[in-house]
Image (cartoon, helix red, strand yellow):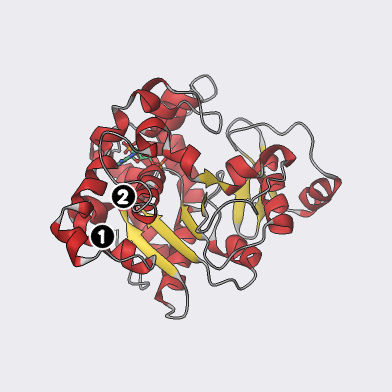
């Protein structure tokens, strides 16, 4: 939903007219498609994707709700998968000169927007893609390909606070000037917002990750912060490119973590002043990082409301926040 689509296809117009709709805080229409809310431009891109995308068994798809650590995950997976081609270091590596969002592109916010039909056949394997789509919408389009899906999950309160800053301070300053943090909390409780509801998305990916035959790896931002080495090794194992003993001895894991760290990426010229990606200045993807900033922003009452909602939705699923 970063970009405006000038015109929608007839198919999209027809679909939209049959979908439940609600107004966002600006009065713009959101439509509910396969359990998630979208602005028309994103919906158009998803339809294009569903119609034209042909999965390859070696594809790797990074899924997340916005502000869950997508940028970090993109950098990590790129660095892990391509480590033989690009040795992880701080002197010469694609991540030093290009934003992670250019190296692993979003399906519905980038590749397929504006009625684009990207030619993805030429890309070498393994192809890396990213999405904010829920599992059911993504899965349908993979047509039973066993390609791997990595899901990054983050605490809902940190996601919300990150999203609010992203929108109100950086990306959509004018549009969001009257939209308070409390408004966003209420929208999260109600579940009607672009790409939401967060809790439904998380729960579905979580459940799918528990099905053994499913190639879905469920990662958590907080675990990445707490035990980065363990988590990156887990990621590499899942992706079928485990670190060798020799790599572990020689510090490859640590080098990847350093390359992809908030401190390193956020200080690179390309991410400070580089040209925008998906209509967003690259520095907007780096704010603060870490766990628990919600405590500095949400009132007790806001936190209580969110906890209550999460408990209602996720209680009993084994997924804790
Ligand atoms: P904060 O706003 O809490 O700082 P996304 O990439 O999904 O848009 O998520 C953005 C959030 O991830 C932001 O959180 C951002 O600061 C944080 N982030 C970006 N790059 C990171 C990195 N390399 N390591 C840890 N966190 C990172």
Mark 2 packing: few (<14 Cα in 10 Å), some, or many (20+)?
A: few
In the image, 260 versus 165, the foreground residue is 260
Mark 1 packing: few (<14 Cα in 10 Å), some, or many (20+)?
A: some
Q: What residue is rendered at 46% in x and 50% in y?
A: 65
Q: Looking at the picture, how far across and down is residue 288, in whole percent?
A: 27, 33
Q: Is disc 2 placed on a helix, strand or loop?
A: helix
Residue 153 sits in quarter: bottom left
Q: Quadrant of ligand 1?
A: top left
Q: Which residue is mark 2?
A: 304
Q: Is mark 1 within 8 Å of ligand 1?
A: no
Q: How many discs appear?
A: 2
Give the spatial CA distance, label 2 vs label 1.
Answer: 30 Å
Image side of residue 28 versus residue 260, left or right: right
> Please, is residue 230 above or below residue 25 in the view?
below
Residue 217 sits in quarter: bottom left
Q: Which residue is mark 1?
A: 231
In the image, 1 versus 165, the foreground residue is 1
Q: Is disc 1 placed on a helix, strand or loop?
A: helix
Q: Using the rendered image of the protein, determine whether residue 309 is visible from the camera's viewpoint.
A: no
Image side of residue 192 versus residue 87, left or right: right
Q: What residue is rendered at 25% in x and 41% in y?
A: 89
Q: Looking at the picture, how far across and down is residue 309, in whole percent?
A: 40, 56
Q: Mark 2 and 1 residues: CB-CB less than 8 Å, in contact?
A: no
Q: Using the rendered image of the protein, determine whether residue 82 is visible from the camera's viewpoint.
A: yes
> Please, is residue 255 above or below residue 90 in the view?
below
Q: What residue is rendered at 48% in x and 28% in y?
A: 179
Image side of residue 122 versus residue 234, left or right: right
| Closer to the eye: label 2 or 1 | 1
In the image, 38 versus 311, the foreground residue is 38
In the image, 24 versus 16, the foreground residue is 16
Q: Looking at the picture, how far across and down is residue 205, in whole percent?
A: 46, 65
Q: Looking at the picture, how far across and down is residue 148, in whole percent?
A: 48, 66
């Amino acid at each position: 939903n970063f970009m405006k689509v000038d015109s929608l296809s007839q198919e999209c117009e027809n679909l939209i007219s049959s979908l439940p709709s609600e107004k966002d805080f600006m009065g713009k229409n959101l439509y509910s498609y396969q359990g998630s809310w979208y602005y028309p431009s994103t919906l158009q891109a998803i339809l294009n994707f569903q119609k034209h995308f042909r999965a390859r068994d070696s594809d790797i798809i990074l899924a997340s709700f916005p502000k869950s650590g997508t940028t970090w995950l993109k950098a990590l997976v790129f660095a892990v998968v391509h480590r033989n081609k690009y040795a992880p270091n701080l002197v010469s590596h694609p991540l030093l000169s290009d934003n992670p969002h250019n190296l692993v592109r979003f399906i519905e916010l980038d590749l397929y927007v504006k009625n684009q039909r990207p030619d993805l056949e030429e890309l070498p394997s393994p192809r890396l893609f990213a999405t904010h789509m829920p599992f059911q919408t993504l899965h349908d389009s993979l047509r039973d390909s066993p390609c791997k899906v990595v899901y990054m999950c983050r605490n809902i309160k940190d996601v919300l606070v990150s999203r609010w800053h992203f929108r109100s301070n950086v990306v959509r300053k004018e549009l969001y000037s009257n939209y308070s943090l409390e408004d966003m909390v209420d929208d999260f409780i109600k579940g009607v917002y672009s790409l939401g509801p967060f809790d439904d998305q998380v729960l579905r990916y979580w459940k799918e990750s528990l099905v053994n035959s499913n190639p879905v790896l469920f990662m958590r931002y907080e675990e990445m912060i707490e035990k980065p080495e363990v988590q990156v090794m887990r990621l590499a194992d899942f992706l079928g490119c485990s670190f060798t003993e020799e790599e572990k001895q020689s510090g490859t894991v640590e080098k990847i973590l350093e390359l992809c760290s908030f401190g390193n990426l956020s200080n690179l010229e390309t991410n400070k002043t580089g040209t925008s990606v998906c209509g967003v200045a690259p520095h907007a993807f780096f704010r603060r990082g870490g766990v628990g900033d919600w405590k500095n922003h949400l009132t007790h009452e806001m936190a209580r409301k969110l906890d209550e909602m999460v408990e209602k939705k996720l209680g009993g699923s084994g997924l804790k926040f």
